[in-house]
Image (tube, grey):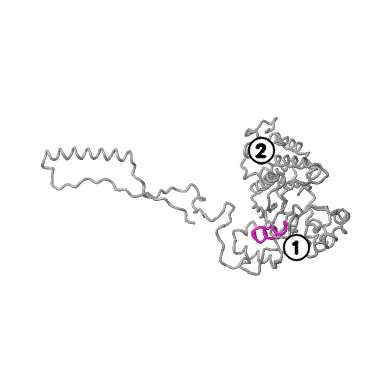
Amino acid sequence: MVCPEFSHPQSSSPMAKPRNRSFWCLPDAFLVFGVAFLALLLVASFWSFFTPTPNFEPTVTDPPSKLSMNPVDCSESGFGVNLKSDPKDPTFYDDPEMGYSLEKPVKDWDQKRAEWLKHHPSFAAGARERIVLVTGSQPKPCKNPIGDHLLLRFFKNKVDYCRIHGYDIFYNNLLLHPKMGSYWAKLPVVKAAMLAHPEAEWIWWVDSDALFTDMEFKLPLERYKNHNLVVHGWPKLIYEKKSWTSLNAGVFLIRNCQWSMDLINTWSGMGPMSKDYEKWGQIQRLTFKDKLFPESDDQSALVYLLYTEKEKYYDHIYLEGEFYFEGYWVEIVGGYENTTERYLEIERGAPKLRRRHAEKVSEQYAAFREEFLKEAGNGKGSWRRPLITHFTGCQPCSGDHNLMYAGESCWNGMVKALNFADNQVLRKYGFVHSDLHDSSTVTEIPFDYPADEGPW
């Protein structure tokens, strides 16, 4: 990229009229000319004062440090990757046999992805830690009058989390496969995202009705280094209880590799695109006695694979149960106030946590906070912030909900959770919601509130 340079128009300076005859021997003429010359000199002086002569030469200043001596590469992003280089070397993108749809299985994906990274070395560095978050919603406007507003806030919440941690995010509101609707719609999107982002090691699917409620927490990727899929679940419920709710498929982290491509191919084969879709529904109901509806669903399908082919899948799937990888909202939202107070109590005794700071360095303060959270616990009964609060059973767009609770409890719980999460973001901008039930008002907070007080 060539950065534009500015140039100034050239202007001519006034020139004295040439003399045609000698005058030094003629006193009168000399006097007249002298007066005229003096007048011209005064005019020129005033002209220079009010109209400074443009500087036509480039200004050169000494660099303040060695870092500034290097020319700026306008092609690089702020994350050290080259966004304007795509070499002509052929990659899988040039293969006409490749396809994004579920009907076209991908083969040799690990080699194809490695080849792409070889031709894009700026992306290779840090690829093991790179995450793309994927989410989405339905193609049409919501039936619930406040549904679209809630979905917007749920999406904003995910954007906030990704911005804080430097993740990319993709929001899809279309059916990428005409038959794969409802809870099955995620699989075509995840596969397409894997192909669209060979630079990313992980694709993180998060349902539209799930939101981040610990904006500081980062996934412990090192824990998952020998696994290809991470879901919230419990082995005992799979292999002893045989429950279709032994895991939750609404939030999962999947590695961008051939194993995952094969899993998606097998997994989606139990969905509506399959000619055996009704048969799979019957098999799932016979296997899982607590499954009450007849249709094959993505969650029961994944549990079925784990249950019936344990040797093939179990060692590759991490069932995360040590923290709220996603947590059931009913057991979470009532504890937000207590969690807020406990965190404030920590900050009252830790000035370094009260210190105002740029949003970009939030992860450092998360690391500071960890030493004070050792006794907080994780999961149910903990006063630690849950990573994700999942409004399972509440459908913000359609307005439908589980009959176990009233619809108002769903929508009120969502507002409370959204404000709880939003406060963690707003504090970096100097404001908070004083009331978690009121989204319309905020309170300004001081740069360092007194140790015996909170920011609100």
**Percent position of residue 376, x then y:** 78, 41
**Percent position of residue 346, x then y:** 72, 36
Would you name the residue on which mark 1 appears? 273
Q: Residue 38 colored magenta? A: no
**Percent position of residue 387, x then y:** 73, 46
Badge 2 marks a residue whose secondary structure is helix
**Disc nearer the start of the sequence (1/2):** 1
SS assignment for the magenta stretch, majority: helix
Q: Magenta residues, as a range?
A: 185-202
Badge 1 marks a residue whose secondary structure is loop
Lateral position of residue 329 relative to residue 430, left or right: right
| Residue at x 36%, y 47% (from the top left corner) | 55
| Residue at x 47%, y 53% (from the top left corner) | 3
Would you name the residue on which mark 2 appears? 352
Asked if residue 180 is positioned above or below residue 386 in the image, the reply reads: below
Q: Residue 193 colored magenta? A: yes
Residue 135 seen in render? no
Q: Which of marks 1 and 2 is in front?
A: 1
User: Counting other residues with Cα less than 10 Å from the Cα at mark 1, is it few (<14), some (14-19), or many (20 or more)?
Assistant: some
